[in-house]
Amino acid sequence: MRWMLRAVVTAVLLVAAAFAVTACGSSDDSSEGGSTASSAGATTGAKPGTKITLWHNSADPPALRQLYRDFEADTGIELEAVANPSAGFEDTTLTRWASGSRPDVLEYHPTVTNLLALNPRANLRDLSGEAYIAKSGDLYRSAATVDGKTYGAVIGFPQVFGIFYNKDVFARAGIETPPTNAAELIEACRTILARAPGVTPIAESGGSQWPVQVLPTLLMGDANPDNRWGQELRSNRAHLDDDGSPFTRAMETYKQLRDDGCFNRDAASATVENSVRGLVEGRVAMVALHSDMIAAMVAAAGGDAAKVDRAIGFFAIGGETPAATYIPSPIGSYYLPRTGDADREAAALEFIRYVTGRGYGRYIAAARAFPVIEGTPEPAGVSALAREVKAAYDRGPANIAYAADVPGVGGVMVLINKLLIGQVEPQQIAEQTQKAVEQAAKAAKLEGW
Amino acid sequence: MNSARGLALRSRTRQGLLREPRRASSVLKYVALTLFAIPWVVLPLWMVVVNALKPLGEAQALSLALPDTWAFGDNLDTVVNDGHYLTGLRNSVLVTIPAIAVVLLLGSMAAWAFARTRSRWLRAAYYLTTLSVLLPPAIIPSIYLLREIGLDGTRLGYALVTISARLGLVIFLTTGFVRALPEDLEDAASIDGAGPWQTYRHVLLPLLRPILLVGGVILMITVWNDFFFALFLLQGEASATLPLTLFQFASSTVDTLSWNLVFMHVVLTSLPLIVVYLFVQRRVLSGLTEGAVKG
Amino acid sequence: MASTTLTPEAGAPEQTAVRSSDPTPRRRKSPREGGHWPWFALPAVVLVAVFFALPFLLNAGFAFSDWSGFSDEIGFNGIDNFRTLIDQEIFWPAVRTTLLYAVCVLVFEMAVSLTLALALESTTRINTIFRSLFFIPVLISPLAAGYIWKGMLATNGPINGMLSFLLPGTVETAWLGDPTTALPAVALIEAWKWSGLITLVYIAGLKAIPKELLEAATIDGANAWSRFWRIKLRMLAPALTFNVAVTLAVALMAYDVIAPTTGGGPGDHTTTLNIAMRLQWGQSFFGPASALSLTVAVLVIASAVPLVMWMRKKEVAQ
């Protein structure tokens, strides 16, 4: 029996060791609260010491996590932060949600297409009339709003889509002005193939799945001023597979680029990390991404933000004319689910008011991000590249991406991936995606279906 | 074979033919094994270790090159502190060890019943329980169920679901094993006046050691590394097990993974398992050898 | 198998039978006479029934509902979910891919494990070292295994590096991105993860083969190859079937390895049923997701259960 004794002793020692170590280790419950009450509760009736749960994205940047801790210190409310892995974020959040679990605060996509999947009418609290809404320009015309009711709060700057390019490669290929539309993009690609051989004109990242949607979305951006096309798609007045639809045309351009050899050979499996690395190192001329990926570029440059600013530029593009296509960011966008507990709901509302009010300025400064709420000074030390993106956004026209309001387009990245390997044609993509839209719209009981 | 020739052959056989093969083919065999082991085991493990030592940017390339910058301390620091490694370790141990103990205990008890019974009901129960080894877990109803009894998000709830999902395998392996054991010892014990519980403890359990060890090792590996159940059944940083702590901090941007931290975490998570395995490996094989795999 | 390695006491039943019909008073019921059995099995059965079977049945029910995140109402909708999945060309490709994947895993695993088992059968020191070495992948979590091999199989990764070294020219195959190689590649990773354990199972099986059989065959003039085919393989049948049943079940539920490596791509070439299910979940289509989950369960039952029952019969016959 000696081995058994040995095993038991080992197990006991392991458990004891684990305990001992954790005793000296972190007590990582995020409870700093209870120390000071504050003036906070005055408006919402929130009481210090209340415990609320926050579901958030595991990729929340440090500045955002600091904001959560600042909230606790300021109001005395205890915030339990539960992370949903950013890989498969929608998947995990929706699965938890589907089982009936409800956090007090939910960080999730503010696009209507994702909001509908939460059934806001039944499950979320109406935040219309809160102070921050009026101070955010016309952000809430399309973000987090359904049937005229606003359900969310957005504190992060939108993700602006566009093309990040390597300035050196462009110079070598003799491209002085970046392309502004589909035709010019195809031309630029051919130029690069001819004049800068060995460089991949456009790096696509099928291996990371979501990035392949960016380029086609850009090419449809100019077709959606004021989100008119998006609204038509959503109410069944326009269809993705209509004749001459911007969707099909964008997919055809994408196919053309592929057929011309503009993409990397391993486009179907390359990861976005590799594409970004190639861009920074000059092996890739262009990558179609969104502004939140600048951090990944800095990481690929070994943390050297100055190097990224020197090497990489940004330009907006469209199908026919350039447009700054954007999507409200999932990072820093919050909803308040109905829980039926008055104390917790008051505390949750306090959270929203804090992050859009008292705590906002400090967060913006720490994150070096652009503010979306009026009255907040722009931070110092923002990278040149980020400022270039913001300039493009301000120049406009800034159109929200077509998919923002249209439910059911989640599967389009798989179809684009199939296009990359020649398994499907642009028209088929349009038809299949339209079917999925129909499925979702009917499930959501949208008008017009 | 009684002939002289037969005798001579047999003695030659005993001496040479069935023992270790000739040296040349033996060397060749081990060379081939080593060549195979390199891409099969050595390279992947090297990749994990070497990338665990690199800083973020370098690791994103996922190469086999040695690190330019030595980031062992930084990565270790991040994983242990920001990644709440120690909490994860504590929770993994707190869930895994009791869960394994319970599965082995209840599973072997049930296996004894299933192996010896003539009852049709019990036989049906055996087949249904064994089926659970093969079926996929239904996660959403499980969450819902736990919430109804107030255990949603707790380690106890997680342990219960884990135990229920893993019982099938232990029952399956152990029942076959018990069936192969002759019933005399148990009968003898009962004639001597031992009750069922005593018979179980003193007669059966010792005999079941080999297969329980095998089952225990398999359980240890699957429960320790489980991510799927833990993701949905555990809430909050205080209850997170090791695989969960991995994801709660491994991403640095919305859409990419910090592979240096991921691999450092993999190393730290696998180490306890490797240690335990080194302890028990000889017993595992002898357990398997003693007719454990009866099917 | 056990009858040859365990005690020679088999054959005592008659003796015991005589004793158990001895009407001595105050003797506890012999174990064989039932009585306490249900209690011993009860805790396990209750746990499995409540925390596993019950959720499973609920899930099966949802497969025929229109449950989604968009609406609070859940209604019965017959086989609409299946029809939608077939229409969108998700269902049948996923079934095909899943079965193909399972077969690939099985083939790789058996090939590798059987070869290793034959090579490492005797318990020498060097063999034990090799066995332990090959066992290490078993200890690594499937998710981690996926990430490791994602790096290994990259176009500029170590595997291509090795091949470029051994073969003329440069090898830059995108193993995980090429439609033809992606599925075998992920199957290989899954096999990689478990081979170490299966090798041990086969070694145990080989060791249990009575020496006399092998000796007799050698004396009869059989060479190594023929010994392998006619005796070893036949005697390994139980271990083989065990491997097949468990591997099939694991492979049919494949997710942990595929998700980090190909995510179901390129296109849908590695989209197994479980991957397709998670994609449906992520779009809030819970009804179709449950339908796919139910399909996995049906496939598992249809393939693995007959195997297990066949194994039972063989064991009884032994």
Image (spheres, coloured by chain):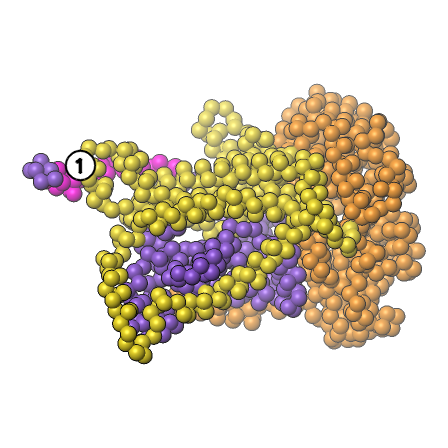
Chain colours: A orange, B purple, C yellow
Say which of A349 and B63 sits in front.
A349
Give the quarter of the image for residue C73: bottom right
The residue sitting at the left extreme is B4
Say which of B16 and C132 sits in front.
B16
Q: Is residue A118 above or below residue A398?
A: below
Say which of B231 and C317 sits in front.
C317
Q: Residues within 10 Å of mark 1 (few under 14, many from 20)?
A: some
In the picture provided, is C131 more to the left or to the right than B14? right
* Horizontal and vertical percent position of residue C105: 48, 39
* Horizontal and vertical percent position of residue B10: 13, 40
Q: Is residue C104 above or below residue B202?
A: above
Q: Is residue C151 visible?
A: no
Q: Is residue A49 magenta?
A: no
In the picture provided, is C303 more to the left or to the right than B7? right
Q: Residue at x 29, y 36 (%)?
A: C230
* Horizontal and vertical percent position of residue B223: 51, 58
Q: Residue at x 21, y 37 (%)?
A: C217
Circle 1 SS class? helix
Q: Residue at x 41, y 70 (%)?
A: C36
Say which of C189 and A20 sits in front.
C189
Quickly name the residue at label 1: C219
* Amino acid identity at mark 1: Ile
Give the quarter of the image for residue A311: top right
Q: Is residue A221 above or below residue B197?
A: above
Q: Is residue C10 visible?
A: yes
Q: Residue at x 71, y 33 (%)?
A: A416
Magenta span dominant secondary structure = helix
Q: Is residue B33 magenta?
A: yes
* Horizontal and vertical percent position of residue B271: 47, 56
Please report, as a chain letter, where disc 1 is located.
C
Magenta residues span B7-36
